[in-house]
Amino acid sequence: MEKIMILNGSPRAPRSNSKQYAALFEKYSRLPTETFSVTGPKAGEIGKKIQEFSHVLLVFPLYADGLPVPLLRFLKEWEQNGFPGKPTVSVLINCGFLEPEQNDVAIDMVKLFCRKNGLTFGSVLKIGSGEAILQTPFRWLVERKIRRLAANMEKGTWSVQRVTMPLTKNMFLKASTKYWESYGKKNGIPRDEMATMSIEKETNVR
Ligand SMILES: Cc1cc2nc3c(=O)[nH]c(=O)nc-3n(C[C@H](O)[C@H](O)[C@H](O)COP(=O)(O)O)c2cc1C
Protein backbone atom coordinates (compact mmCIF):
# COMPACT_ATOMS: atom_id res chain seq x y z
CA MET A 1 0.00 0.00 0.00
CA GLU A 2 1.23 3.48 -0.84
CA LYS A 3 2.10 5.73 2.07
CA ILE A 4 4.08 8.87 2.62
CA MET A 5 6.86 9.54 5.12
CA ILE A 6 6.99 13.29 5.78
CA LEU A 7 10.43 14.35 6.96
CA ASN A 8 10.77 17.73 8.61
CA GLY A 9 14.32 18.90 7.87
CA SER A 10 14.19 22.15 9.84
CA PRO A 11 16.80 22.59 12.59
CA ARG A 12 14.06 24.25 14.67
CA ALA A 13 11.58 21.48 13.95
CA PRO A 14 9.19 21.79 16.92
CA ARG A 15 8.66 25.51 16.31
CA SER A 16 9.23 25.56 12.59
CA ASN A 17 7.29 26.84 9.64
CA SER A 18 8.08 23.48 8.06
CA LYS A 19 6.05 21.87 10.85
CA GLN A 20 3.05 23.94 9.80
CA TYR A 21 3.54 23.11 6.11
CA ALA A 22 3.86 19.42 6.99
CA ALA A 23 0.65 19.60 9.05
CA LEU A 24 -1.20 21.14 6.11
CA PHE A 25 0.08 18.40 3.83
CA GLU A 26 -1.13 15.77 6.31
CA LYS A 27 -4.52 17.46 6.36
CA TYR A 28 -4.90 17.30 2.58
CA SER A 29 -3.24 13.98 1.77
CA ARG A 30 -5.57 11.11 1.06
CA LEU A 31 -2.65 8.69 1.19
CA PRO A 32 -1.68 7.75 4.75
CA THR A 33 1.18 9.83 6.14
CA GLU A 34 3.55 9.65 9.08
CA THR A 35 5.68 12.62 10.09
CA PHE A 36 9.20 12.53 11.50
CA SER A 37 11.74 15.19 12.19
CA VAL A 38 15.40 14.65 11.33
CA THR A 39 16.27 16.33 14.65
CA GLY A 40 13.39 15.02 16.78
CA PRO A 41 13.13 12.25 19.37
CA LYS A 42 11.93 9.76 16.73
CA ALA A 43 14.88 10.56 14.40
CA GLY A 44 16.58 7.28 15.29
CA GLU A 45 13.60 5.32 13.95
CA ILE A 46 13.64 6.93 10.51
CA GLY A 47 16.35 4.68 9.06
CA LYS A 48 14.52 1.52 10.04
CA LYS A 49 11.05 2.70 9.02
CA ILE A 50 11.81 4.46 5.75
CA GLN A 51 11.68 1.27 3.71
CA GLU A 52 7.98 0.86 4.62
CA PHE A 53 7.09 4.00 2.64
CA SER A 54 6.50 4.40 -1.09
CA HIS A 55 7.05 8.18 -0.91
CA VAL A 56 9.28 10.47 1.11
CA LEU A 57 8.31 14.13 1.28
CA LEU A 58 11.17 16.33 2.43
CA VAL A 59 9.73 19.47 4.08
CA PHE A 60 12.47 21.93 4.90
CA PRO A 61 13.61 25.57 4.87
CA LEU A 62 16.23 27.11 2.61
CA TYR A 63 19.38 27.78 4.62
CA ALA A 64 22.15 29.83 3.00
CA ASP A 65 20.89 28.88 -0.48
CA GLY A 66 21.14 25.19 0.38
CA LEU A 67 19.97 22.41 2.65
CA PRO A 68 20.05 22.78 6.46
CA VAL A 69 22.90 20.76 8.00
CA PRO A 70 20.70 18.25 9.91
CA LEU A 71 19.01 17.35 6.63
CA LEU A 72 22.35 16.98 4.84
CA ARG A 73 23.49 14.73 7.66
CA PHE A 74 20.34 12.66 7.36
CA LEU A 75 20.80 12.26 3.57
CA LYS A 76 24.37 11.08 4.11
CA GLU A 77 23.23 8.45 6.62
CA TRP A 78 20.42 7.36 4.34
CA GLU A 79 22.91 6.92 1.52
CA GLN A 80 25.15 4.79 3.73
CA ASN A 81 22.25 2.58 4.84
CA GLY A 82 21.00 1.99 1.28
CA PHE A 83 17.54 2.18 -0.26
CA PRO A 84 15.77 -1.17 -0.13
CA GLY A 85 12.30 0.43 -0.45
CA LYS A 86 13.27 2.82 -3.31
CA PRO A 87 10.73 5.50 -2.37
CA THR A 88 9.96 8.44 -4.63
CA VAL A 89 11.35 11.65 -3.15
CA SER A 90 9.33 14.88 -3.30
CA VAL A 91 10.15 18.32 -1.89
CA LEU A 92 8.17 21.00 -0.10
CA ILE A 93 10.64 23.81 0.51
CA ASN A 94 10.13 27.29 1.94
CA CYS A 95 12.44 30.29 2.04
CA GLY A 96 12.36 33.68 3.73
CA PHE A 97 12.80 35.77 0.59
CA LEU A 98 9.91 36.65 -1.68
CA GLU A 99 11.05 34.71 -4.76
CA PRO A 100 10.30 30.95 -4.77
CA GLU A 101 13.18 30.52 -7.27
CA GLN A 102 15.62 31.21 -4.43
CA ASN A 103 14.96 27.54 -3.60
CA ASP A 104 16.12 26.16 -6.95
CA VAL A 105 19.71 25.32 -5.98
CA ALA A 106 18.56 23.38 -2.91
CA ILE A 107 16.03 21.50 -5.06
CA ASP A 108 18.83 20.66 -7.52
CA MET A 109 20.83 19.24 -4.60
CA VAL A 110 17.98 16.85 -3.77
CA LYS A 111 17.61 15.95 -7.48
CA LEU A 112 21.30 15.12 -7.66
CA PHE A 113 21.01 12.99 -4.52
CA CYS A 114 18.17 11.05 -6.16
CA ARG A 115 20.00 10.64 -9.46
CA LYS A 116 23.14 9.40 -7.75
CA ASN A 117 21.20 6.84 -5.75
CA GLY A 118 18.73 5.63 -8.38
CA LEU A 119 15.70 7.15 -6.65
CA THR A 120 12.80 8.71 -8.55
CA PHE A 121 12.47 12.44 -7.96
CA GLY A 122 8.77 13.29 -7.67
CA SER A 123 7.00 16.62 -7.17
CA VAL A 124 8.09 20.01 -5.90
CA LEU A 125 6.37 22.87 -4.15
CA LYS A 126 8.61 25.90 -3.66
CA ILE A 127 7.35 28.59 -1.33
CA GLY A 128 8.64 32.16 -1.21
CA SER A 129 7.93 34.45 1.79
CA GLY A 130 7.60 31.20 3.71
CA GLU A 131 8.33 32.73 7.10
CA ALA A 132 5.31 35.02 6.80
CA ILE A 133 2.72 33.82 4.34
CA LEU A 134 0.78 31.51 6.66
CA GLN A 135 0.05 34.44 8.99
CA THR A 136 -1.36 36.61 6.21
CA PRO A 137 -4.60 36.68 4.19
CA PHE A 138 -2.61 34.92 1.42
CA ARG A 139 -2.50 31.68 3.42
CA TRP A 140 -5.14 30.15 1.15
CA LEU A 141 -2.75 30.39 -1.82
CA VAL A 142 -0.36 28.01 -0.03
CA GLU A 143 -3.13 25.69 1.12
CA ARG A 144 -4.36 25.38 -2.45
CA LYS A 145 -0.90 24.41 -3.70
CA ILE A 146 -0.34 21.94 -0.88
CA ARG A 147 -3.67 20.29 -1.66
CA ARG A 148 -2.57 19.99 -5.30
CA LEU A 149 0.82 18.59 -4.26
CA ALA A 150 -0.92 15.90 -2.20
CA ALA A 151 -3.27 15.05 -5.09
CA ASN A 152 -0.38 14.86 -7.57
CA MET A 153 1.62 12.57 -5.33
CA GLU A 154 -1.41 10.32 -4.98
CA LYS A 155 -1.87 10.19 -8.77
CA GLY A 156 1.86 9.87 -9.49
CA THR A 157 1.69 13.01 -11.65
CA TRP A 158 4.98 14.79 -11.00
CA SER A 159 4.67 18.55 -10.88
CA VAL A 160 6.63 21.69 -10.05
CA GLN A 161 4.62 24.39 -8.33
CA ARG A 162 5.55 27.74 -6.84
CA VAL A 163 3.75 30.14 -4.53
CA THR A 164 4.53 33.41 -2.80
CA MET A 165 2.79 36.53 -1.53
CA PRO A 166 1.54 38.65 -4.43
CA LEU A 167 3.50 41.74 -3.36
CA THR A 168 6.09 43.88 -5.10
CA LYS A 169 9.67 43.48 -3.85
CA ASN A 170 9.46 46.96 -2.34
CA MET A 171 6.27 46.24 -0.43
CA PHE A 172 7.70 42.93 0.79
CA LEU A 173 10.92 44.59 1.92
CA LYS A 174 9.05 47.28 3.85
CA ALA A 175 6.68 44.80 5.49
CA SER A 176 9.44 42.34 6.41
CA THR A 177 11.71 45.08 7.81
CA LYS A 178 8.84 46.30 9.98
CA TYR A 179 8.16 42.73 11.12
CA TRP A 180 11.77 41.93 12.06
CA GLU A 181 12.27 45.28 13.78
CA SER A 182 9.26 44.77 16.01
CA TYR A 183 10.34 41.16 16.64
CA GLY A 184 13.77 42.44 17.67
CA LYS A 185 12.21 45.10 19.89
CA LYS A 186 10.09 42.46 21.62
CA ASN A 187 13.32 40.59 22.39
CA GLY A 188 15.37 43.66 23.32
CA ILE A 189 17.53 43.58 20.17
CA PRO A 190 17.86 46.90 18.30
CA ARG A 191 18.07 47.18 14.52
CA ASP A 192 21.84 47.94 14.45
CA GLU A 193 22.57 44.81 16.49
CA MET A 194 20.46 42.72 14.15
CA ALA A 195 22.56 44.04 11.26
CA THR A 196 25.81 42.69 12.75
CA MET A 197 27.23 39.18 12.89
CA SER A 198 27.12 39.33 16.70
CA ILE A 199 23.52 38.18 16.45
CA GLU A 200 25.01 34.78 15.53
CA LYS A 201 26.68 34.58 18.95
CA GLU A 202 23.33 34.55 20.71
CA THR A 203 22.72 31.03 21.90
CA ASN A 204 19.49 31.56 23.81
CA VAL A 205 16.37 31.40 21.66
CA ARG A 206 14.13 34.05 23.06
C1 LIG B 1 20.59 30.26 9.19
C2 LIG B 1 19.49 30.67 8.23
C3 LIG B 1 19.77 30.77 6.87
C4 LIG B 1 18.76 31.17 5.97
N1 LIG B 1 19.06 31.31 4.66
C5 LIG B 1 18.11 31.73 3.79
C6 LIG B 1 18.42 31.94 2.41
O1 LIG B 1 19.54 31.71 1.95
N2 LIG B 1 17.44 32.41 1.61
C7 LIG B 1 16.17 32.66 2.06
O2 LIG B 1 15.32 33.08 1.28
N3 LIG B 1 15.85 32.45 3.36
C8 LIG B 1 16.78 32.00 4.23
N4 LIG B 1 16.46 31.79 5.54
C9 LIG B 1 15.07 31.97 5.99
C10 LIG B 1 14.35 30.63 6.18
O3 LIG B 1 14.39 29.85 5.01
C11 LIG B 1 12.89 30.91 6.56
O4 LIG B 1 12.87 31.69 7.74
C12 LIG B 1 12.09 29.66 6.76
O5 LIG B 1 10.71 30.03 6.88
C13 LIG B 1 12.48 28.89 8.02
O6 LIG B 1 11.72 27.70 8.03
P1 LIG B 1 11.62 26.74 9.28
O7 LIG B 1 10.85 27.52 10.36
O8 LIG B 1 10.86 25.58 8.80
O9 LIG B 1 13.00 26.41 9.75
C14 LIG B 1 17.45 31.42 6.45
C15 LIG B 1 17.17 31.30 7.82
C16 LIG B 1 18.18 30.93 8.70
C17 LIG B 1 17.86 30.83 10.18
Image: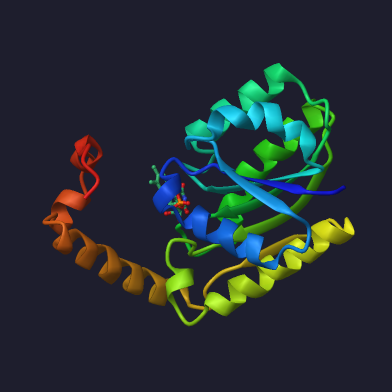
Give percent across and percent down for residue 206: 21, 50
Task: Determine whether 138 is above or below 19 in the image.
Answer: below
Residue 50 seen from this side: yes
In the shown orientation, is residue 140 left or right of residue 150?
left
The mark tally for this picture is: 0
Q: Is residue 134 left or right of residue 193?
A: right
Q: Residue at x 70, y 22 (%)?
A: 79
In the rendering, at what x and y percent does residue 16 appear? Answer: 44, 53
Where residue 144 sits in the image (x, y, percent)? 67, 74
x, y percent for residue 28: 69, 67
Above-or-below relation of 200 to 77: below
196 or 59, nearer to the observer: 59
Q: Residue at x 69, y 41 (%)?
A: 108
Of residue 128 and residue 21, the one placed in the foreground of this image is 21
Residue 95 visible in the picture: no
Q: Quadrant of residue 124?
A: bottom right
Task: Answer with the quarter of the image where residue 25 lies.
Answer: bottom right
Q: Write the residue at 83% across / 31% down.
A: 85
Q: Quadrant of residue 125?
A: bottom right
As drawn, the residue found furthest toward the bottom would be 137
